[in-house]
């Protein structure tokens, strides 16, 4: 499942885009915003979207810099939602442009193409890899990412990436949730859980 | 449907029965007769515009009248938020605990799974309680104090010291944490519940979890998008009024 978020201030347009995304198999519409919410960039970063569909003219205040934050990201593709008449203005820094006037199938094609471009090893293959299982065990035993990195001779960045993939594959984000999963699946005996 | 104050409350509930617990929060109970929302609010001494705004916000996630909500007094907002806290802690949470117990008995689940889910929810409850306690003991009093200062009402000396160093920015991330844990619990039940054959108790539990999630999200939305911007605006006004002052 690819995680999609939408930013569009007009209700009719937002509802239409949401309906389109929900029609496309393999995409999950996780949330929509109007564009004027405070600290939107940080909120969206936390959602870890694969695709952002954003009307750049809906963004206001500090949020104007939002598309730039994801520029040339391999994990998130950003598509602009625009009117044909906006073509004349210089719109740059997006992975593709979607025009309100366009045919449904063209829109769908463009969205699918970008969804396919997202480099995301975690989404197609739901089973945890042996390495991920090792890391999951350490996490629920209460080790920090740094401690795990030291033990496995990995960089902290690599451990962070593994953790993101674990969260994504299982659909569980919190350590408590991961602990429940690990014990239910006999990856770790209950006695070895971190003391709370 | 856009709820209007001239509508009969009974018609509103026919249209969306999930509003009943919200209506209860205002001290209004079933047996509405043919009374309109305005009439019922007058009888209970409630601000009808506020009541209608909250009902609309809850009924339709797309309805979020920031400007209108911001015009209500902070005291009115906080009174509502605290009523919602009571209903989370005194009604929703105990109800869900019972449903978890019911599920572990009726499904039946193995001992370890039962214990895990029970503990997970206990832990979640503690986190939610802690968050609510922090709001009621620190954040809300701070906001009320700010409003007083802003209206040039007298405040006692000890209290104004608080304004000095209190910052609201740290607290926002907590809403996300509470949200994530609840999502994990739902997903564990939906995806990973091992070898159980009786879905009904699980479904009853899930239904309540979805309802709690909706309620909490709406609540956090009011806190994040109305209360906090109000605080930020008041802090700014105070700073401008008194550039050398404590804020
Ligand atoms: Fe609250
Ligand atoms: Fe809160």
Image (spheres, rainbow, N blue to C red):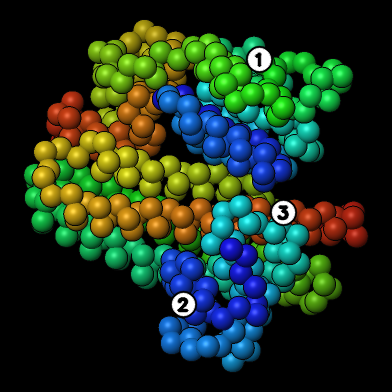
Q: Is residue B131 visible?
A: no
Does the residue tagged 2 have its C-beta within 8 Å of any atom of ligand 1? no
Residue B228 in the image: above or below residue A173:
below
Label for residue A95? Answer: 1
Cβ atoms under marks 1 and 3 closer than 8 Å = no
Query: Is B16 situated left or right of B223 in this image?
Result: left
**Residue at image coords 19%, 55%:** B201
Q: CA distance from mark 1 to mark 3?
A: 33 Å
Query: Is B176 situated left or right of A63 in this image?
Result: left
Disc 3: which residue:
B229
Q: Is residue B169 visible?
A: yes
Query: Is A66 situated left or right of B190 in this image?
Result: right
Q: Secondary structure at mark 1?
A: loop
Mark 2 or mark 3: name the one nearer the start of the chain: 2
Q: Position of residue B198 (x, y in %)?
A: 13, 49
- Residue in the foreground of this view, choosing between A141 and B215: B215
Disc 2: which residue:
B24
Q: Quadrant of the N terminus of chain B?
A: bottom right
Quadrant assignment, res A129: top left
Q: CA distance from mark 2 to mark 1?
A: 49 Å
Q: Chain of mark 3?
A: B
Q: Quadrant of the C terminus of chain B?
A: bottom right
**Residue at image coords 26%, 36%:** B191
Quadrant assignment, res A100: top right
């Amino acid at each position: 499942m690819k995680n999609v978020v939408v930013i569009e201030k007009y209700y009719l347009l937002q509802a239409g885009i949401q309906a389109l995304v929900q029609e496309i198999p393999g995409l999950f519409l996780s949330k929509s915003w109007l564009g004027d919410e405070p600290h939107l960039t940080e909120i969206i970063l936390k959602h870890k979207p694969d695709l952002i569909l954003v009307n750049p003219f809906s963004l206001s205040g500090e949020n104007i810099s939002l598309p730039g934050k994801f520029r040339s990201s391999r994990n998130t593709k950003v598509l602009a939602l625009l009117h044909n008449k906006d073509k004349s203005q210089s719109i740059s820094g997006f992975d593709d442009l979607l025009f309100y006037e366009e045919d449904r199938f063209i829109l769908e094609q463009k969205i699918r193409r970008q969804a396919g471009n997202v480099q995301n090893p975690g989404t197609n293959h739901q089973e945890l890899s042996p390495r991920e299982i090792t890391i999951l065990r350490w996490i629920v035993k209460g080790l920090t990412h740094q401690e795990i990195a030291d033990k496995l001779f990995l960089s902290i960045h690599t451990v962070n990436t593994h953790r993101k993939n674990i969260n994504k594959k299982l659909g569980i984000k919190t350590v408590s949730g991961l602990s429940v999963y690990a014990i239910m699946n006999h990856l770790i005996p209950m006695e070895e859980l971190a003391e709370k | 449907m856009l709820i209007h104050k001239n509508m009969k409350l009974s018609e509103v509930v026919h249209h969306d029965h999930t509003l009943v617990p919200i209506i209860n929060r205002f001290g209004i109970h079933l047996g509405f007769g043919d009374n309109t929302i305005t009439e019922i609010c007058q009888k209970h001494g409630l601000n009808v515009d506020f009541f209608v705004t909250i009902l609309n916000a809850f009924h339709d996630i797309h309805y979020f009248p920031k400007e209108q909500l911001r015009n209500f007094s902070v005291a009115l907002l906080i009174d509502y938020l605290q009523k919602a806290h009571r209903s989370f802690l005194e009604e929703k949470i105990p109800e869900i605990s019972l449903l978890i117990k019911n599920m572990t008995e009726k499904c039946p689940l193995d001992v370890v799974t039962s214990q895990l889910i029970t503990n997970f929810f206990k832990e979640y409850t503690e986190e939610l309680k802690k968050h609510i306690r922090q709001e009621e003991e620190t954040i809300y009093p701070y906001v009320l104090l700010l409003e007083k200062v802003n209206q040039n009402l007298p405040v006692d000396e000890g209290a104004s010291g608080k304004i000095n160093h209190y910052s609201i920015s740290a607290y926002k991330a907590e809403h996300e944490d509470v949200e994530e844990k609840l999502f994990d619990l739902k997903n564990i039940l939906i995806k990973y519940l091992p070898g159980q054959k009786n879905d009904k108790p699980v479904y009853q539990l899930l239904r309540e979890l979805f309802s709690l999630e909706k309620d909490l999200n709406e609540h956090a939305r009011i806190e994040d998008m109305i209360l906090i911007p109000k605080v930020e605006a008041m802090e700014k006004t105070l700073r401008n009024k008194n550039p050398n002052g404590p804020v």
